[in-house]
Amino acid sequence: MPVSLDFDASHRYGEAIDGIEIPIALSVGRQSVELIAKLDTGAANCIFERKYAEILGLDIESGRLQQFRTVAGSFAAYQHEVTIQTLGIEFSAVVFFAQDASFSRNFLGRSGWLERVRVAIVDYDRVLFLSPYDSSSSN
């Protein structure tokens, strides 16, 4: 039986050799920064480079410290609440900023991002479709 899905936004991403990149903005108060983050459905949390916390004026070490372990190694990051804006969709989220300034990756994970949106990916066409999770356009 056919299923119909409606989304509020779409995003054409480049060849996904290194992952699906999505433009986002992070903000705290009046401070805001735009960046490109990779969608990581296997990541439990959203994790960003330390420099973005500094641009937002956050006292990084005032956040809760958490250790993360991956197949590539481990690293520490600090928890903070920010506003995330993605393709016209905006919400508050708890995210992490890397402790080490040499950490150079930005990930959108399940907690803080994926749990807040409805997403569909047609990788053959390199298109991501997105709506807020509680959007009235959902079926």
Image: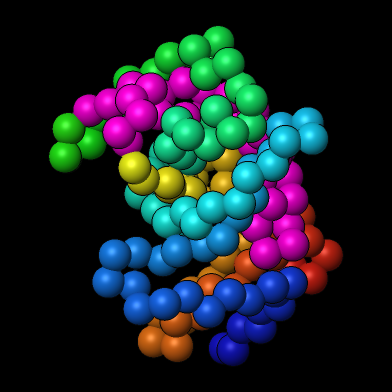
The way the protein has been coloured in the rendering is rainbow
Classify residue 107 as left or right of residue 68. Answer: right
Image label count: 0
Q: Could you tell me which residue is drawn at 43 percent across and 47 percent down?
A: 107
Residue 14 lies, with reference to residue 114, above or below; the image says below
- Magenta-tinted stretch: 74-103
Q: Is residue 137 magenta?
A: no
32 and 40: which is toward the camera: 32
Residue 47 lies, with reference to residue 122, above or below; the image says above
Image quadrant holding the C terminus, namely bottom right
Q: Could you tell me which residue is drawn at 61 percent across and 83 percent down?
A: 3
Task: Give the quadrant of residue 49.
Answer: top left
Q: Is residue 95 visible?
A: no
Q: Is residue 136 visible?
A: yes
83 and 55: which is toward the camera: 55
Image quadrant holding the N terminus, namely bottom right
Q: Is residue 75 magenta?
A: yes
Task: Give the quadrant of residue 83.
Answer: top right
Residue 139 lies, with reference to residue 110, above or below; the image says below
Residue 71: x, y in percent?
Answer: 16, 40
Classify residue 65 as left or right of residue 86. Answer: left
Residue 15: x, y in percent?
Answer: 35, 78
Query: Outermost residue toward the right?
Result: 136
Residue 114: x, y in percent?
Answer: 55, 51
Report the predominant secondary structure element of the magenta stretch.
strand
Q: Could you tell me which residue is drawn at 47 percent across and 21 percent down?
A: 78
Q: Could you tell me which residue is drawn at 53 percent across and 79 percent down?
A: 12
Query: Outermost residue toward the left?
Result: 72
Residue 86: x, y in percent?
Answer: 65, 57
